Image (cartoon, grey):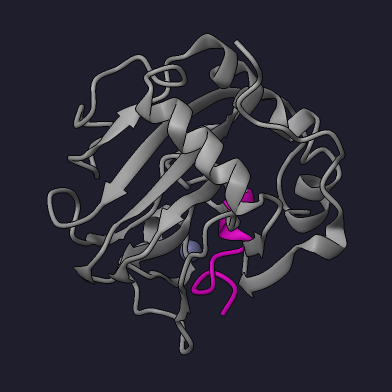
Protein backbone atom coordinates (compact mmCIF):
# COMPACT_ATOMS: atom_id res chain seq x y z
CA UNK A 1 0.00 0.00 0.00
CA UNK A 2 1.37 3.42 -0.86
CA UNK A 3 1.78 5.94 1.94
CA UNK A 4 -1.45 7.79 2.61
CA UNK A 5 0.26 10.88 3.96
CA UNK A 6 2.95 12.52 1.86
CA UNK A 7 5.06 14.76 4.10
CA UNK A 8 8.56 14.85 2.67
CA UNK A 9 9.76 17.97 4.50
CA UNK A 10 9.60 18.95 8.16
CA UNK A 11 6.95 21.52 8.89
CA UNK A 12 8.31 25.06 9.21
CA UNK A 13 7.52 27.33 12.13
CA UNK A 14 6.53 30.17 9.83
CA UNK A 15 3.77 27.99 8.38
CA UNK A 16 1.90 28.05 11.69
CA UNK A 17 -0.24 30.90 12.95
CA UNK A 18 -1.53 31.24 16.49
CA UNK A 19 -5.31 31.02 16.85
CA UNK A 20 -5.50 31.04 20.65
CA UNK A 21 -3.09 30.27 23.51
CA UNK A 22 -1.78 26.78 22.76
CA UNK A 23 -3.69 26.47 19.48
CA UNK A 24 -2.09 26.86 16.04
CA UNK A 25 -3.13 26.43 12.41
CA UNK A 26 -1.35 25.63 9.14
CA UNK A 27 -2.41 24.41 5.73
CA UNK A 28 0.19 21.85 4.60
CA UNK A 29 -2.10 19.75 2.42
CA UNK A 30 -3.52 20.43 -1.01
CA UNK A 31 -7.16 19.69 -1.69
CA UNK A 32 -5.92 16.91 -4.03
CA UNK A 33 -4.08 15.24 -1.14
CA UNK A 34 -7.20 15.51 1.00
CA UNK A 35 -9.31 13.98 -1.74
CA UNK A 36 -6.78 11.18 -2.17
CA UNK A 37 -6.79 10.33 1.52
CA UNK A 38 -10.58 10.48 1.68
CA UNK A 39 -10.80 8.24 -1.38
CA UNK A 40 -8.61 5.67 0.35
CA UNK A 41 -10.76 5.90 3.45
CA UNK A 42 -13.89 5.39 1.40
CA UNK A 43 -12.25 2.48 -0.39
CA UNK A 44 -11.52 0.94 3.00
CA UNK A 45 -7.76 0.94 2.59
CA UNK A 46 -6.79 3.37 5.30
CA UNK A 47 -9.40 2.37 7.83
CA UNK A 48 -10.49 -1.17 8.27
CA UNK A 49 -13.21 -0.56 10.81
CA UNK A 50 -16.74 -0.04 9.63
CA UNK A 51 -18.22 3.46 9.40
CA UNK A 52 -20.19 4.77 12.35
CA UNK A 53 -18.23 2.86 14.92
CA UNK A 54 -18.13 5.11 17.94
CA UNK A 55 -14.53 6.42 17.85
CA UNK A 56 -14.49 7.79 21.41
CA UNK A 57 -16.78 8.90 24.17
CA UNK A 58 -17.47 12.26 22.50
CA UNK A 59 -18.34 11.12 18.97
CA UNK A 60 -21.09 8.83 17.76
CA UNK A 61 -20.07 8.92 14.11
CA UNK A 62 -16.63 8.26 12.71
CA UNK A 63 -14.02 5.57 12.29
CA UNK A 64 -11.03 4.52 14.31
CA UNK A 65 -7.76 4.32 12.38
CA UNK A 66 -6.56 0.79 12.67
CA UNK A 67 -4.66 0.50 9.45
CA UNK A 68 -1.06 -0.31 10.50
CA UNK A 69 0.63 1.82 7.82
CA UNK A 70 -1.42 4.93 8.47
CA UNK A 71 -1.22 4.45 12.25
CA UNK A 72 2.57 4.20 12.01
CA UNK A 73 2.76 7.33 9.87
CA UNK A 74 0.61 9.32 12.26
CA UNK A 75 2.50 8.02 15.31
CA UNK A 76 5.87 9.21 14.02
CA UNK A 77 4.79 12.75 13.01
CA UNK A 78 5.95 14.32 16.33
CA UNK A 79 9.45 12.92 15.68
CA UNK A 80 9.53 13.76 11.98
CA UNK A 81 7.22 16.31 10.37
CA UNK A 82 6.54 18.12 13.69
CA UNK A 83 9.93 17.54 15.34
CA UNK A 84 10.85 21.24 15.46
CA UNK A 85 7.37 22.64 15.62
CA UNK A 86 6.06 20.91 18.76
CA UNK A 87 8.85 21.90 21.21
CA UNK A 88 8.86 25.47 19.88
CA UNK A 89 5.11 26.06 19.83
CA UNK A 90 4.60 24.24 23.15
CA UNK A 91 7.65 25.14 25.28
CA UNK A 92 5.86 24.18 28.52
CA UNK A 93 5.66 20.52 27.45
CA UNK A 94 8.13 18.30 29.28
CA UNK A 95 10.46 16.35 27.05
CA UNK A 96 9.86 12.75 26.32
CA UNK A 97 8.34 10.48 23.81
CA UNK A 98 4.77 10.50 22.59
CA UNK A 99 4.34 6.84 23.36
CA UNK A 100 0.63 6.64 22.73
CA UNK A 101 -1.62 7.97 20.01
CA UNK A 102 -5.29 7.59 19.24
CA UNK A 103 -6.34 8.38 15.65
CA UNK A 104 -9.90 8.61 14.40
CA UNK A 105 -12.12 10.24 11.79
CA UNK A 106 -15.12 12.34 12.73
CA UNK A 107 -18.04 12.99 10.40
CA UNK A 108 -20.32 16.02 10.64
CA UNK A 109 -23.40 16.12 8.45
CA UNK A 110 -27.12 15.58 8.21
CA UNK A 111 -26.79 11.88 9.03
CA UNK A 112 -23.80 12.22 11.36
CA UNK A 113 -22.68 14.55 14.14
CA UNK A 114 -24.51 17.88 14.12
CA UNK A 115 -22.46 19.61 16.80
CA UNK A 116 -20.10 18.80 19.65
CA UNK A 117 -20.37 20.05 23.24
CA UNK A 118 -17.60 21.86 25.09
CA UNK A 119 -14.83 19.49 26.16
CA UNK A 120 -11.11 18.93 26.55
CA UNK A 121 -9.29 16.10 24.80
CA UNK A 122 -7.69 13.12 26.57
CA UNK A 123 -4.42 14.13 24.97
CA UNK A 124 -1.40 16.35 25.55
CA UNK A 125 -1.36 17.50 21.92
CA UNK A 126 -4.16 17.11 19.37
CA UNK A 127 -3.66 17.14 15.60
CA UNK A 128 -6.83 17.92 13.65
CA UNK A 129 -6.75 17.60 9.84
CA UNK A 130 -9.71 18.77 7.75
CA UNK A 131 -10.16 16.53 4.70
CA UNK A 132 -13.49 17.84 3.49
CA UNK A 133 -15.76 20.72 4.38
CA UNK A 134 -18.71 22.14 2.49
CA UNK A 135 -20.74 22.60 5.66
CA UNK A 136 -22.59 25.65 6.79
CA UNK A 137 -21.70 26.02 10.45
CA UNK A 138 -19.54 23.35 12.07
CA UNK A 139 -16.83 25.80 13.16
CA UNK A 140 -14.51 24.81 16.00
CA UNK A 141 -14.52 27.28 18.89
CA UNK A 142 -11.74 27.53 21.47
CA UNK A 143 -12.70 28.90 24.90
CA UNK A 144 -9.33 28.81 26.64
CA UNK A 145 -6.78 26.46 28.17
CA UNK A 146 -7.59 25.28 31.69
CA UNK A 147 -6.20 22.67 34.04
CA UNK A 148 -8.33 19.82 35.42
CA UNK A 149 -9.28 21.89 38.48
CA UNK A 150 -10.49 24.85 36.40
CA UNK A 151 -11.97 23.09 33.39
CA UNK A 152 -15.45 24.47 34.16
CA UNK A 153 -14.35 28.06 34.71
CA UNK A 154 -15.77 30.81 32.46
CA UNK A 155 -14.40 31.08 28.91
CA UNK A 156 -11.60 33.40 27.89
CA UNK A 157 -12.72 36.96 27.28
CA UNK A 158 -12.14 36.32 23.57
CA UNK A 159 -13.19 32.90 22.35
CA UNK A 160 -11.76 31.93 18.99
CA UNK A 161 -13.80 30.47 16.15
CA UNK A 162 -12.18 28.69 13.20
CA UNK A 163 -13.87 27.61 10.00
CA UNK A 164 -12.01 24.66 8.48
CA UNK A 165 -10.90 24.63 4.87
CA UNK A 166 -9.86 21.27 3.38
CA UNK A 167 -6.13 20.86 4.03
CA UNK A 168 -6.20 22.84 7.28
CA UNK A 169 -4.33 21.34 10.19
CA UNK A 170 -4.83 22.49 13.75
CA UNK A 171 -2.34 21.63 16.47
CA UNK A 172 -3.45 22.41 20.01
CA UNK A 173 -2.91 21.43 23.61
CA UNK A 174 -5.42 18.86 24.78
CA UNK A 175 -6.60 21.15 27.59
CA UNK A 176 -7.58 24.00 25.22
CA UNK A 177 -11.36 23.68 25.69
CA UNK A 178 -13.37 23.59 22.48
CA UNK A 179 -16.77 22.89 20.99
CA UNK A 180 -18.23 22.64 17.48
CA UNK A 181 -21.00 24.99 16.30
CA UNK A 182 -24.23 23.38 15.05
CA UNK A 183 -24.27 22.40 11.37
CA UNK A 184 -26.93 24.03 9.21
CA UNK A 185 -26.15 21.91 6.13
CA UNK A 186 -23.42 20.20 4.15
CA UNK A 187 -20.78 17.99 5.73
CA UNK A 188 -17.32 18.06 7.22
CA UNK A 189 -14.87 15.19 7.69
CA UNK A 190 -11.75 15.48 9.84
CA UNK A 191 -8.92 13.17 10.83
CA UNK A 192 -7.83 13.59 14.44
CA UNK A 193 -4.87 12.28 16.38
CA UNK A 194 -4.53 12.52 20.15
CA UNK A 195 -0.84 12.35 21.15
CA UNK A 196 0.11 11.44 24.72
CA UNK A 197 3.50 11.65 26.39
CA UNK A 198 4.30 8.21 27.69
CA UNK A 199 5.46 9.35 31.14
CA UNK A 200 2.63 11.80 31.87
CA UNK A 201 -1.00 11.43 32.93
CA UNK A 202 -3.43 13.00 30.47
CA UNK A 203 -6.15 14.22 32.82
CA UNK A 204 -4.72 17.78 32.74
CA UNK A 205 -3.68 17.69 36.41
CA UNK A 206 0.04 18.05 35.60
CA UNK A 207 1.90 21.10 36.94
CA UNK A 208 2.99 22.05 33.41
CA UNK A 209 -0.66 22.07 32.33
CA UNK A 210 -1.42 24.42 35.23
CA UNK A 211 1.31 26.72 33.89
CA UNK A 212 -0.84 27.43 30.81
CA UNK A 213 -4.17 27.49 32.67
CA UNK A 214 -5.57 31.01 32.45
CA UNK A 215 -7.22 30.72 35.89
CA UNK A 216 -4.10 29.34 37.63
CA UNK A 217 -1.96 32.12 36.18
CA UNK A 218 -4.50 34.94 36.73
ZN1 LIG B 1 -5.89 25.95 36.66
Q: Whole-percent x and y of residue 174?
A: 50, 50
In the image, the segment drawn in magenta is 208-218
| Residue 106 visible in this rendered orientation of the protein | yes
Q: Is residue 13 magenta?
A: no
The quadrant where residue 137 appears: bottom left
Above/below status of 183 relative to 168: below
Secondary structure, magenta segment, majority class: loop
Residue at the image position 38 percent from the left and 53 percent from the top: 120
Residue at the image position 46 percent from the left and 72 percent from the top: 163
- Quarter of the figure with the C terminus: bottom right
Residue at the image position 47 percent from the left and 26 percent from the top: 40
Q: Whole-percent x and y of residue 143?
A: 42, 73
* Towards the viewer: 150 or 89: 89
Q: Whole-percent x and y of residue 109?
A: 21, 55
| Residue 198 visible in this rendered orientation of the protein | no
* Towards the viewer: 195 or 63: 63
Amino acid sequence: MKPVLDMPNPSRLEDWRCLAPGAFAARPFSSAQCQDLLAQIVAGKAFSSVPREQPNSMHNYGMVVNNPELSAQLACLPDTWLATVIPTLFPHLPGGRFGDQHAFMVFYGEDAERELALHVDASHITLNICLENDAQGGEINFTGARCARHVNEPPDRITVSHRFEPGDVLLHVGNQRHHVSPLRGGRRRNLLVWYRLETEVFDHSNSWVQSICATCSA
